[in-house]
Amino acid sequence: MLAAIPLMIVPLVAYNLVLFGLIGGGVAGLGSTVTSLSMMSGATWTMSVGDLLIVVSLVLLFIEVLKATRTGPWSVIDHMLSMLVFIGFLVEFLLVRDAATQVFFILMVIAFVDVIAGFSVSIRSAGRDVSIGL
């Protein structure tokens, strides 16, 4: 049952926590620095809260694609819930002023790739499970 919960809901909830100021201090907090490293070239590499959200989302996307290879009764529910999460991203992007950022758009695209990849991988792997008896 818990395997049917789409992991892409984590970045959506995390962004909304940042949006309401519970983490990072509002939308301006997306640009706040999480870490900063001096590189051997002399440049300074920084990672912001928004960058961290995108990286976490990409890792969760990888796990979602792995989950899509399973076939079973919960896989259809997982795909439907992933579609609802993407619709949630899309509605929030279109209707909420503070969600109209590059970070949120990239998160929405990652959720879209999750939906498309999930359906594609499931259809492909389900086609291999079909056996025709003679």
Image (cartoon, grey):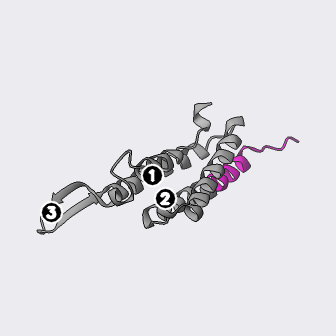
Side (left or right) of 118 relative to 98: right
Provide the residue span drawn in magenta: 118-134
Q: Position of residue 9 (x, y in %)?
A: 53, 46
Circles 1 and 2 in contact, beta carbons < 8 Å: yes
What's the residue at 43%, 47% (across, down)?
Answer: 17
| Mark found first going from the N terminus, 2 or 3 | 3
Residue at the disc numbered 2 = 107
Q: Is residue 11 magenta?
A: no
Label 3: few (<14), some or many (≥20) within 10 Å?
A: few
Mark 1: secondary structure = helix
Amino acid type for the residue under numbered disc 1: Tyr
Q: Nearer the viewer, residue 66 or 12?
A: 12
46 up-or-down from 122: above or below:
below
Residue at the extreme top: 1
Q: Is residue 120 magenta?
A: yes
Residue name at image x 39 percent, y 58 percent = 27
Local SS, label 3: loop
Quarter of the picture containing the N terminus is: top right
Q: Residue at x 83, y 44 (%)?
A: 132
Q: Position of residue 110 (x, y in %)?
A: 52, 58
Amino acid under label 3?
Answer: Met
Residue 47, percent from left and from top: 27, 58
- x, y percent for residue 14: 44, 47
Other-residue count near label 2 (Cα within 10 Å), few / some / many at <14 / 14–19 / ≥20: many
Q: Between tags 3 and 1, which lies in front? A: 1
Residue 39, disc = 3
Question: In 3D space, how far apart are the residues under numbered discs 2 and 3 (Cα atoms)?
Answer: 28 Å
- The mark found on residue 99 in the picture is none
Which is nearer the N-term, disc 3 or disc 1? 1
Label 1 or label 2, whichever comes before in sequence order? 1
Which is in the foreground here, disc 1 or disc 2?
Answer: 1
Horizontal relation, residue 125 to residue 27: left or right? right
